[in-house]
Amino acid sequence: MSMVPVVVAGVAVGCGLGLLVRELARPQPSLAAALRRTAAGTSADEARGAAGRDEAVGRWLLERIAHLPGVTVPAKDLALLAQTPERFVLLKAALAVAGLLLPSVALLPWQLAGSGVPLPVPAVLGIVAAAALWFVPDLSVRDQARRAREEFAHAVAAFLDLVALKRAGDAGPTEALEQAASVGDGWAFQRLQQALVRARDDKTSPWQALSELAEDLDLPVLDDVADIMRQSSDDGAAVYATLRGRARSLRAELLEKQAAEANANSEKMTAPGALLAVLVMLLIAFPAVIRIITT
C-alpha cells in the first residue's frame, strides 16, 4: 500500500490545524486601531498592529505553557536585551513547529516518488528537530546577555571615572551621577539615564535606583557604584580615590577575563590545526605510498 496519500493527508491536516489555532488565538481587532488604519493606512500603523498581534499570541502561549516543567523564561536576560517574554515564547513555539513540520515537507518528494520512506521516520525526525529548535532561543539569549553584560561592565568602568571627575569638581552625589550618565549615548548609558530620571520622578535616591537596576538586570558591577555613592551621601566621605580605584580594578578584571577567553579560543584551535597538518602530510605522502604498494 502506498504511503503517499497518508503523508499528503497528514500534511494537509497539520496545516489546517495550524491555521485553525492561528485564527482562534488571534485577538479581536480594536475599533480605534481599525479606524486609524482606515483613515491613515500608514505602514507604521500596520507594523504596530502586527507587533500587537505577535504580543497577544505570545501572551496566550505564555499563559498556557508557563506552568509546564522544563519551560523557563530568562526574564533578566530578556530585560537586559530589551525583549519581551511574549515574543521570546512566540519565537520558541514558531521554531518548534517549523522543526516538527520540516522533515515531513523535506521527505514529501521521496514519498511522491514512491520511495517508500516509512511513516514513523518523518514523525521521529520532526519531534527531534522540534525539541532541538525549542532550546535555540534560550542559547541565543544567554549568549547575547553575556556579551551585553561584558559591554555594560566596560561602560560602568568609564562611568566610574566620570563620576569621580564630577565629584572632584565639587558636584553633589546626585548631580555627579546624572551629569556622568548624560555624557555617553550608548545603550548602557541610556539605561543609566533612564534609571536616574525615574529616581528623580519617584523622589527616591539615585543609588537606590542603580541598585534596583542592578538587581533587575543581574548587573553586580553596578552595585559598587550605588554602594560608593550611598556611602558618600551618608557620611560625606571623599570618594574620588575610591571611584578611580574601583574603575582600575574593574578594567583589570575585564582584561584578565578577555585574556582567559583568548587563551581558551587558542587552545580550541590547536586540535583543528593539528588535524589539518596531519591531512596535509597524508596528501603529500599518498602518491609515494601508492607507488610503493603497486610496485
Image (cartoon, rainbow, N blue to C red):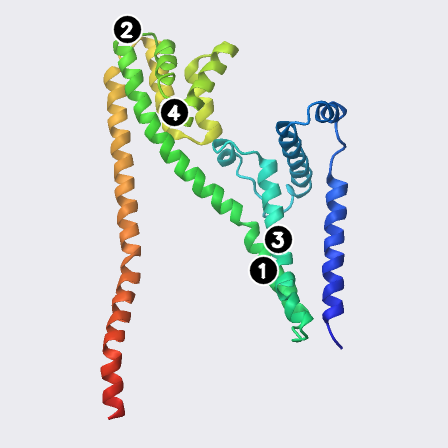
User: Which residue was labeled with disc 1?
Assistant: 128
Task: Tell me which amino acid carries mark 1.
Answer: Val
Instruction: Pick whichever of labels 1 and 3 is earlier in the sequence.
Output: 3
x, y (%) of residue 79?
51, 31
x, y (%) of residue 154?
32, 30
Task: Tell me which amino acid carries mark 2.
Answer: Asp
x, y (%) of residue 180?
34, 16
Instruction: Pick whichever of labels 3 and 4 is earlier in the sequence.
Output: 3
Instruction: Pick whichever of labels 4 and 2 is earlier in the sequence.
Output: 2
The picture quadrant where one finds residue 279 is bottom left
Instruction: Pick whichever of labels 2 and 1 is earlier in the sequence.
Output: 1
Of the pair 152 and 70, the residue shown nearer to us: 152
| Distance Cα–Cα, label 1 vs label 3 | 12 Å
Q: Is residue 136 above or below residue 209?
A: below
Q: Is residue 143 above or below residue 32?
A: below
At label 2, counting other C-alpha atoms closer than 10 Å, the crowd grade (few under 14, some 14-19, many 20 or more) is few
